[in-house]
Amino acid sequence: MKFSSQDHQMMQKAILLAKQGIFTTAPNPNVGCVLVKNGQIIGEGAHLKAGEPHAEVHALRQAGENARGATAYVTLEPCSHYGRTPPCAEGLIKAGVAKVICAMVDPNPQVAGRGLAMLNAAGIETASGLLEADARALNTSFLQRMETGKPFVQLKMAASLDGKTALKNGESQWITSKEARQDVQRYRALSGAVLSTAKTVIEDNASLNIRWDDLPLSIQKNYPEKKLRQPLRIILDRQHQLTSGLKLFKVGSDVVTISSHFTHSIESQKDHLHCNVCDEGKLILSEAIDKVAQEYNVNHIWVEAGATLAASMIEANLVDELIIYLAPKLMGADGRSLLNIVGLTAMSEAIELDITDVRMVGKDIRITAKIAR
């Protein structure tokens, strides 16, 4: 189908609306909807939080009876199943819209074309594929999990310009700038879970939660602290080192520990969750990540850890994207290295990266890269 300039304009508007939910909708996708009649917008909306009304519902409520005969522009195929809310396809049918244009078909097995089929069966004209690349970019992690069953994994690393993460004595605060640390808070806010190790948590007494006061002002302005979603914290604790006195358990959201026995527990922690994925005392990272994503409905995992876990995840092909902050500092040859990958004997064995973005964040350089496969 050939789309008009108005179709493009209205879908662009729907995509902008969808971005309103990027910090709050997970594990649901970000979706925007615009209702148009006689060339005029009569209703618009965005999905803002799982369990709350979808974008189409907000737009239909705004349009009221005027929705009859209108065209709906939606960034993702309207849902066709009953979940915590009724099917949006059914709502559009009841409202009497004449046409629905969606940017892309929903790969969720519960939808996957059924929403469009339901609309067609009701005599509503449908089309899809308008600005699909832009719509996919809204929901990278959701789409990956729906299409592959695997969560989207981002690995964050920070180092001096000579690739060191700490001095020989372990001192590391602070290598990067305040602006870079704020940027990390933004990435945490985008994710469904933050993954780290007991060693990192204990050494830094880390909470791994989102500190609203440390978020960029642009986010604070649009997302009051009480509305911001805290990510799940996943801690690899094979040797059962975590204790209830850690700051990790005093602030933030639920904690999932992954260890070698089901018997491990932390006293007086109501929100302490647990799963076990281990083989002869060694954690199987791929199974651990898949199990947590499935059991706790996580699309996007943000990894903050040391050189050993980072190396293990890269070597196991578990990383979809690297976020690397390089500070304008030189910390010397005896500092701790960024990545504990050893044993390479030929340049052909080096891990190659495809750099997709480079930009300044404060005084630091932020590199976004994918592992060349």
Image (cartoon, grey):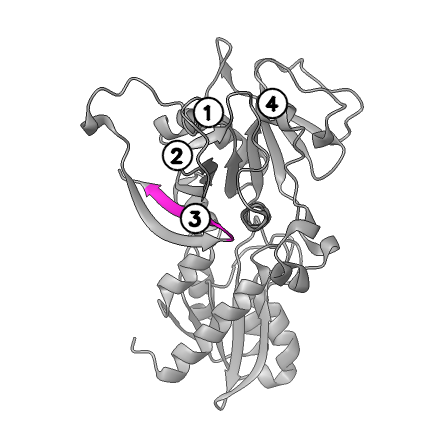
Residue tagged 1: 335
Question: Which quadrant of the figure contains the N terminus?
Answer: bottom left
Callout count:
4
Q: Nearer the viewer, mark 1 or mark 3?
A: 1
Do residues under tags 3 and 2 come within 8 Å of each other at their CB atoms?
Answer: no
User: Going by the picture, which residue comes out furthest to the top?
Assistant: 280
Residue 117 position in % (x across, y down): 42, 64
Image vertical order of residue 328 relative to residue 280, above or below: below
- Is residue 368 part of the magenta span, yes or no? yes
Looking at marks 3 and 4 on the same chain, the residue that comes earlier in the sequence is marked by 4
Do residues under tags 4 and 2 come within 8 Å of each other at their CB atoms?
Answer: no
Camera-side residue: 373 or 97?
Answer: 373
Residue 296 in which image quadrant:
top right
Residue numbers of the magenta segment: 362-370
Q: Nearer the viewer, mark 3 or mark 2?
A: 2
Q: Please, what is the dominant secondary structure of the magenta stretch? A: strand
Looking at marks 4 and 2 on the same chain, the residue that comes earlier in the sequence is marked by 2
Q: Is residue 102 visible?
A: yes
